[in-house]
Amino acid sequence: MLLSRVADALYWISRYLERAEHTVRVVDVRLELGIDREAPGEMMRRTILDAANPDSVIACVIAARENARQVREEISSDMWQQINELFLRLREVQTAKMELTRPHYVARMVVEGAHLFHGITDETMGHGEGWRYLQAGRYLERASTSAALLDRHFDRQIGAAAASRSSSNLEWIALLRSCSALEAYCRRYTADIRPDRVAEFLLLDPQFPRSVRFAAARLESALRAIGGLTPRSAGGNRAERLAGRFHASLDYAQVDEFLNEDPHGTLVAVGRYCAQIHAALYQGYITYPIESALPA
C-alpha cells in the first residue's frame, strides 16, 4: 500500500505533464495557422517559458519534475532521466530564446518528451498501485482539458447550429489538430469537416485516445484498480462510483442530444465530474483520516 504522499506525487506527475502537452499543442497549432492576433514570440514566452505563470508549460514540467524527485524510490531511473532531460532542454530553450526563432521545434520537443515519459513508464514500471495513480492523473486531466477545449468552439447561448455558421473551417481544423485528431477524424468521416462530427469524435468516440469518453473509461479502470488494492474509506468508493457514472453518461450519450440540448452545459458538466472525482480521490486515498487506514 502506497504512502499517501507517494500517491499524491505520482498522480500530479501525470496531471502536470498532460497539462503541459495539451497547452503546447494548442499554442503550436494556433501559431502555425495564424489564428491568434497576439505576437508569436510573446505568446510562446507567456504560455511556454514563463516560469512565473503557474499554467505555463515550463511551470508544469518543473512541478512534475519536483514530484518525481520526491518519489525517486517509486519510479524507474529511466523515468527520472526522461523528465529531468525534458526540464533541462526547456531551460536551454529559455537561455537561447529559441521560442522566437523555432517555436514549432520547441512544441514538438515538449510533446515528444511527454510521450517518451509515458512510454518509458509503461515499459519500466510495474503496473501496480503507483502506475494506476499515474494513469488516473493523466486521464482525469485529459478529460477535463479536452472538454474545455471543445467547449470553446460552441456558442454558449445559441448552440452548435450557430457555432457551425460563425466558425470557419480553420477553427475546427485547429481543434482537431490540437488533439492530434485530424487524420483519425478523416479516416472515420472523410475530409468533410462538420462541427457535429467533430463533437461526436472528440467527445464520444470510444477508441480515439484523446476523446473524453476514452479518457473516462481509462480513469474508471484506474480508480477501480486502486480501490481493489487499497480499500480505505467511503471517499475512495465515491471516487470509483463517480468515475463509473461519468463513463456511463458518455457511453449512452448521443451526439444529436448533445447538440440540440445544451452543448455548453454538457461540457461544463464534464469539468464538474472531473472536479468531483478529484475531490473524492483525495478524500479517499490521500487526505483520508488516519483512523480509516487502521484495522477494524
Image (spheres, rainbow, N blue to C red):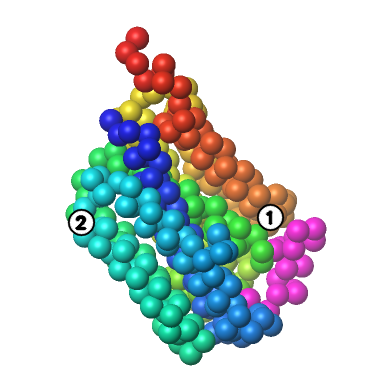
Relative image position of residue 193 (x, y in whole percent): 58, 75
Residue at 51 percent across and 33 percent down: it is 280
- Indicate the position of residue 235 as horizontal and vertical percent values: 48, 27
Q: Position of residue 140 (x, y in %)?
A: 48, 48
Q: Residues within 10 Å of mark 2 (few under 14, many from 20)?
A: few
Q: Where does the magenta region start and end? A: 154-171
The residue positioned 55% from the left and 59% from the top of the image is: 54
Observer-nearest residue: 93 or 296?
A: 93
Mark 1 sits on what residue? Answer: 263
Residue 160 magenta: yes
Q: Does the magenta segment cover residue 164?
A: yes
Q: Mark 2 touching mark 1, by CB under 8 A? A: no
Crowding at label 1, few (<14), some or many (≥20) Cα neighbours within 10 Å?
many
Give the alpha-carbon distance from disc 2 to disc 1, as whole Å. 44 Å
* Numbered label attached to residue 122: none
Q: Please, is residue 32 above or below residue 260 in the view?
A: below
Q: Is residue 279 visible?
A: yes
- Would residue 138 be visible to someone looking at this image? no
Circle 2: residue type = Ser
Tell me the residue that label 2 is attached to: 77
